[in-house]
Image: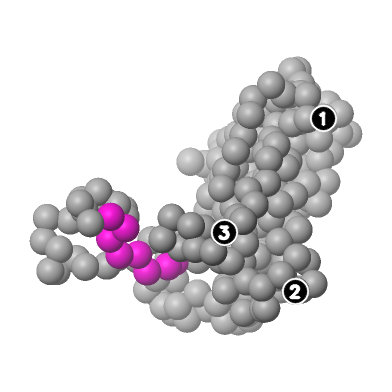
Amino acid sequence: MENKDGSPTLILLNAWRGERVNAQAVLYSKIDLQNTTLSMSDLKSGRNRISSSAIRINPVRYVMTDELNKDGKGSCGHRPDKTKYDSTMVADILDIYKDNFSVSANSVQPVWLTVVVPADAKPGLYSGLLTLKTSAGKQVVLQLKLNVQNQTLPQPSECGFHLDLWQNPYAVARFHNVPLWSEKHFELMKPLMKILADAGQKVITATIMHHPWNAQT
């Protein structure tokens, strides 16, 4: 949608203070885009602001998926002809954005945004800009608006909700190609565990036997 002045709006989000809200932008190009950079400005509402450091940017990576279960109920979507659709590409991984990334011609690149609203944020309508720049000098600007309401979400440690998501430490080591249980492995797992803790995770899954559940863990 567009504002009355014709400027583009990415999305309007509503959030309590202390809440995390998400949005997704999808990039499409007819040509290869190399060394594409993304930046998010502070969100401003009059004299009040939410720092850009409270906003995470994660390019979404596609992965190949096949059938998970023998009965055909796994994976993503119904496949009437399994000989034709033995596998599919799905947008799955929230990748770590570092300095830049590339977009192939005639393909789409989703970008996931997470706004961690500070618990002390002032209520109001905030606005900021997501800016995409290419090595060729092209630039696209999208607007993000956030309506912070006069309610405060309790900290995860104060919530009665019990979150228990299974974690797979083997997957982290395999993805980053580091030795299991090495210092580097634990270093790579720490920010992932922090995300779970911030979401309210109150337990850590510890696998104490070799390849339980047919090596699913």
205 up-or-down from 163: above or below? below
89 up-or-down from 117: above or below? below
Residue 100 falls in which quadrant of the image?
Answer: bottom right
Could you tell me residue 12's position as x and y percent?
Answer: 58, 35
The image's mark for residue 119 is 1
In depth, the one of 117 and 153 nearer the eye is 153
The mark lying in front, picked from 3 and 1, is 3
Disc 3 crowd rating (10 Å Cα; few below 14, some 14-19, many 20+) is few
Q: Residue at x 86, y 34 (%)?
A: 48
Residue marked by disc 2: 182
Helix, strand or loop at label 3? It is loop
Q: What amino acid is found at the position of numbered circle 1 in the picture?
A: Ala
Per the image, is 67 magenta?
yes
In depth, the one of 105 and 85 nearer the eye is 85
Residue marked by disc 3: 209
The mark lying in front, picked from 2 and 3, is 3
Please say whether residue 92 is visible from this viewpoint: no
Residue 192 falls in which quadrant of the image?
Answer: bottom right
- In magenta, the rendered stretch is 62-69
Please say whether residue 155 is visible from this viewpoint: yes
The mark lying in front, picked from 1 and 2, is 2
Residue closest to the far front: 209
